[in-house]
Image: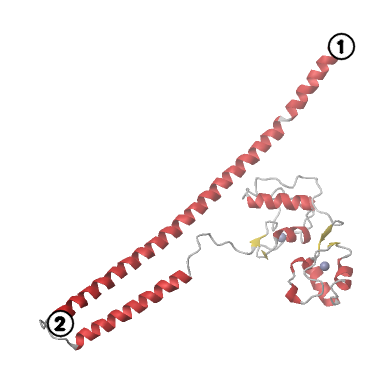
Amino acid sequence: MDEHKRSLIVEFEELLNDLIEPTAQLSNIVDKTKHSLTLEHQKQLDCLKQTYEKQINEIEQQLMNLSEIQDQRNNIFKQLIKIQANEILLTHDDFQKVEFLTKEITQFMKLSKDKEENKVNLQPKRSKFTKCPLTTLNVYGLALSHNVRLCCPKKKIQYLYHHLCNYHRLTTYYTNELIQAIKFDLDPTTTIIFPLNTKIISLDDKYPCPLHYTPIESEIRCAPCTTLVTRKFLPVHLQTVHRLRAAEIKEILKKN
Ligand SMILES: [Zn+2]
Ligand SMILES: [Zn+2]
């Protein structure tokens, strides 16, 4: 009985020891995520601060211009009182001053209106396109043995999820993992998402049809398409559902 108890305790201890490494890994990932979040937060704060300072400077400049205009108008008004009191004569010059001031006010109004219409957005602009990270091996643990096709570094991707599934044939699990890592800005050279000797692509799985994001205005039959198709069945699907011609199908297959 004692022997059995001891062996159970040893087994329990071993199980507990086995947890040390995964726990450390998890803690590492959480630390990295926290660090990237802090960096991103700081970047956004800096950007916000800069935009705010720029706008405040512009407004202060406007206030200065406005006060100059008011001074000029007050001076002309004083001139008018003197003219009315016959202290000085009304000259052509006085009319010119008023004309000049009117022009200045019109210009000022136009500028203010333009600024109001083109209000600077305080949100930093994000590009609609993104770059695919799978342009080289040794990123996120990617090795030759994974048999993933690489893509050109200049390629601009609009729908990364779709691209990773369709072009690189990553399984949905690894696609999601990779997208999370990109979102948290994890270092591709040290973060391992694709473990060695693991199947990360799937040629038989179903993928969203390449016409998934094709707008309705394209006038392609049944686009945008929400069907999931296998690679093998894709040409048939494109022909029967979307009624595409052989050349168009060939073009799509080349891209996907
Ligand atoms: Zn790619
Ligand atoms: Zn389709």
Give the residue number, with chain letter if any, for mark 2: 84
Image quadrant occupied by the C terminus: bottom right
Label 1 beta carbon less than 8 Å to ligand 1:
no
Q: Amino acid at mark 2?
A: Gln
Q: Amino acid at mark 1?
A: Met
Q: Which x, y percent locates residue 76?
A: 21, 78
CA gap, disc 2 and disc 1: 121 Å
Vertical position of residue 105 compared to residue 180: above or below: below
**Left or right of 92: which side holds 177?**
right
Instruction: Locate residue 129: give its quadrant.
Output: bottom right
Q: Nearer the viewer, residue 39 or 54?
A: 54
Q: Secondary structure at mark 1?
A: loop
Give the farthest residue toward the bottom: 92
Residue at the (21%, 77%) spot, across then down: 77
Q: Is residue 149 above or below residue 186?
A: below
Q: Quadrant of ligand 1?
A: bottom right
Q: Which residue is mark 1?
A: 1
Q: Residue at x 17, y 87 (%)?
A: 91
Residue at left offset 44%, top offset 70%: 115
Where's the N terminus, which quadrant? top right
Of the pair 101 and 127, the residue shown nearer to us: 101
- Local SS, label 2: helix
Q: Quadrant of residue 78?
A: bottom left
Q: Position of residue 72 (x, y in %)?
A: 24, 74
Instruction: Give 97 or 122, whichever is nearer the viewer.
Output: 97
